[in-house]
Image: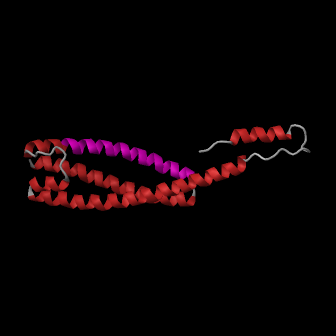
Amino acid sequence: MRELWRELIEALEETLALYRYMLELSGNKKDVLVRGKPVELEAINREEESLLLQGKELEHRRAKATAVLVAACGLGNDKPTLAELADVAEPDAAKRLLSLKEDFSTVLQELSRLNSVNAKLTEQALAFVNYNLNLLTRRQAEPTYAPAGAAFRESAMSALLDRKV
């Protein structure tokens, strides 16, 4: 039984480490969004995608370990919380599960806050880009004294750039 608890705790600890790294990346992303560095933003987004795949694997490990423990302990709830698992765990495992519960709560609250800030920064950056595109692509009245073909080039350029991101 001790081995089952160890396996669950290891999966949770690895997941927590992943969330902490995601928190660090989110802080870096905020700085990159503020400074307007698209190349760095793209690199961070790729890293986040990789972390999400790792998180999916860890979630699978956690769910498998939890299912085995639920069956072994005879719990009625097939998706117990960490507190519910701690209630039926051995004393050392229970202590670690409750500690992990607190750590997850702290990290996830901060991650949620940073993700909200980053979403607002992204929306502002997108609004800025759209505003500038509108300025660049605004069609103006064609001058009557323009050289032949000049009005055509201007309207062709506007048609090419008349896109919203």
Residue 140 on image: x %, y %: 78, 47
Residue 106 on image: x %, y %: 30, 62
Q: Nearer the viewer, residue 82 or 165?
A: 165
Principal secondary structure, stretch drawn in magenta: helix
The correct choice, above or below, for 121 with respect to 134 in the image is below
The magenta stretch spans residue 149: no
What is the total number of numbered labels drawn onto the structure image? 0
Q: Residue at x 73, y 42 (%)?
A: 158
Residue found farthest to the front: 141
Q: Is residue 97 left or right of residue 41?
A: left
Q: Residue at x 37, y 55 (%)?
A: 21
* Quadrant of the image containing the C terminus: top right
Residue range (magenta): 37-64
The magenta stretch spans residue 52: yes
Residue 36 on image: x %, y %: 57, 57
Q: Residue at x 13, y 57 (%)?
A: 94
- Residue 71, by quadrant, is top left
